[in-house]
Amino acid sequence: MDYISTRGSAPALDFEGATLAGLASDGGLYLPREWPRFSEAEIADMAGLPYAQLAARVMQPFVGDCLTPERLLELTTIAYGRFAHKAVTPLKQFDEQHWLLELFHGPTLAFKDVALQLLGLLFEEFLARSDRNLTIVGATSGDTGSAAIDAVAGRDKINIFMLHPHGRVSDVQRRQMTTVLAPNVHNIAIDGSFDDAQAMVKRMFNDNALTDRFAIGAVNSINWARLMAQVVYYFAAGLQLGAPHREIAFSVPTGNFGDVFAGYVAAQMGLPVAKLIVATNVNDILHRALTSGDYSAGTVTPTAAPSMDIQVSSNFERLLFDLGGRDGALMRDQMQTFDSSKALQLTNAQRDGAAALFASARADSDAMSQAMRWAWEKCGELIDPHTACGLHGAQNVAIDGKTPVVTLATAHPAKFRDPVERATGNRPALPARVANLFDREERYAELPGDYAAVTEYVAAHAIPKG
Ligand SMILES: *Cc1c(COP(=O)(O)O)cnc(C)c1O
């Protein structure tokens, strides 16, 4: 399988190349040249497979010749063996129509573990084939950082530099990153906001002084391999609820449009998806784009669901590219317009294509609290504020009564204990796998919000590409 850039001018790469590159050299994002499609019989044949086997089956067409089916299954078995639930992503029933897909049983309590546990193994596998060393740089508002650090800590030929805004992530989130003391893990608390950290990281990808010496890699959802790994749980849930013989709707708490784009990919591959509900908090650029065709960024409002406090949804570019006839030149123009004016208009083809599969909903803080209370009082389930946005969407978008609606539970409620306690009167306990988090030693560097200071630190601690 070949991977092409959404902006049309970067060279096509194989799966290994796209995984290590992260961002395409023309500024675009990599996508498979075409969508692999399973027949109804092939999907029916997947029912009942253990998660690691299902994952290998769903991902094999994307991996192509870069891994044998046997090796891919070995890697998925290792990655998903680290989850605290045998089903990996168990499905719970709320009522006749509504279901909850729990994606937070990985080591760091958010759905990002599902993809990053595998990505860490893929990096190590591909780097072992060459003399290359990889320098991963990332910015996090919490969940990506801890999941990525857990996935690569102690791995050969990889160093990770994770920037977080000093004092602006929760204690649980910070400690999940800073108590990992492996020598290849470098946590940096910078003075400034998440956006400042993110802007520095983007600059590093285009900084020749760095890229000449170091192979810079990405762990956020611009990396295709992350989305690929997330397609699997749409199949897992769909198969349990009657696919391929019945349609399923999904409601997805959304920030960077990565998780819900994985649902779009599952639909392209033949899973019968009735609707994908794009659930946002008050940072609602996607809700506005899908209802009015106007994709324009506002300013970020902090909410109780910080991993969705995003105004620029990187992966939306992948959808616009696919719906716009895969026209790299059109994408380059649209994204240039967006970069200069912070707004772009969807074409008619993009609007109609999106409307066929997507619906959207926006949850303010009252709606989030209400959803948390409903789950607790009606079903005895504590859900986190991100999941609450998803449940709000599931309950407020009209879906045919015969179609099951699955809300994706993207974080464990213990990761966001204060808002959960405020809404429900119940303080979720930390699960056993992180119970000693507050007894562990922390280590991180504190740097000013200054690009030169941060790159100097990276250059001093990274390993040249080789
Ligand atoms: C990252 C994250 C999201 C948003 O996912 P996207 O793929 O960026 O849309 C939602 N909920 C939680 C808990 C997250 O960590």
Image (cartoon, grey):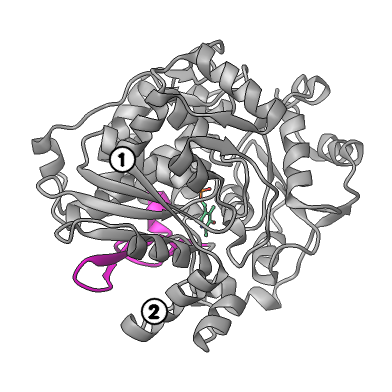
| Above/below status of 148 relative to 119 | below
- The answer to if 16 sits in the magenta stretch is no
Picture quarter with the C terminus = top right
- Residue 446, how many percent across, how many down? 87, 55
Q: Residue 374 shows which numbered tag?
A: 2
* Structural distance between the alpha carbons of marks 2 and 1: 27 Å
Question: Residue shown at 91%/36% (left/top)?
Answer: 452
Q: Which residues are magenta?
A: 78-107
Q: Amino acid at mark 2?
A: Trp
Question: Residue shown at 28%/57% (left/top)?
Answer: 398
| Above/below status of 107 relative to 436 | above
Question: Residue shown at 54%/85% (left/top)?
Answer: 427
- Residue 64, how many percent across, how many down? 34, 24
In this rendered view, identify the residue nearer to me: 384 or 131. 384
Question: Residue shown at 48%/69% (left/top)?
Answer: 412
Q: Amino acid at mark 1?
A: Leu
Q: Earlier in the sequence, mark 2 or mark 1?
A: 1
In this rendered view, identify the residue nearer to me: 128 or 280. 280
Picture quarter with the N terminus = top left
The answer to whether residue 204 is left or right of residue 255 is right
In this rendered view, identify the residue nearer to me: 289 or 197. 289
- The answer to if 87 sits in the magenta stretch is yes
Q: Which residue is mark 1?
A: 357
Q: Secondary structure at mark 1?
A: helix
